[in-house]
Amino acid sequence: MAVCCDVFLKEQPNKFKGQVNQRGQVDGRDTVTKLCISFMTTEMIEIEGKMKPRYASVWFSASWGTSEYPSNARDFVKTWQPKITDANIAKLDTEKLVGLPAWLTIVHNVGKDGKTYANVKSAVMPPPGHPAPAIPADFVRHDAKPENAQAKAASAPVPAAAETDDLPF
């Protein structure tokens, strides 16, 4: 059981620059924008001698794709929040995902640095009667951390809309 505690965009070097994609085009982008959706779980782990909720996240290309060619981000969010559909995902303000509950499937992967990372594989709505855990009062969101406070990324996967009546928020 978890709660979405952060959603942010991050500019990263494009590891595919110069390579030919499936459409036969050379990828000339220096950087790519990634979307991170992060969760705090009910599982407690020891960090620097203190018990804290496990933090796990999932990363996507910052695009919703199309209904015909959906992105992984689109599929993930629609599976987690079934009221979000192809018809209304373009209006989704990703900030409104923060605080929503999720039942997660987490996989553990060992990185190049030898550390084990908890990565979210999928998220669904929790069964009735399972309240979301609270986001700890001392949790600092990515864009509020001093090293990231200079500015948030200029664009979101989709623009926020003033009208969100058809979304589950």
Image (cartoon, grey):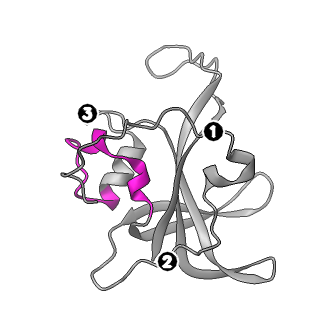
Q: Say the numbered circle drawn on residue 151.
A: 1
SS of the residue at dot 3? loop
Mark nearer the viewer, 2 or 1: 1
Check if mark 3's residue and mark 1's residue have beta carbons within 8 Å. no
SS of the residue at dot 1? loop
Mark nearer the viewer, 3 or 1: 1
Residue 64, image x, y percentages = 37, 38
SS of the residue at dot 2? loop
Q: Say the numbered circle drawn on residue 134.
A: 2
Q: Say the numbered circle drawn on residue 159.
A: none
Residue 18, image x, y percentages = 64, 17
Query: Does the segment drawn in magenta span residue 96?
Result: yes
Residue at numbered disc 3: 68
Residue 138, image x, y percentages = 65, 72
Q: Which residues are magenta?
A: 79-98
Q: How many marks?
A: 3
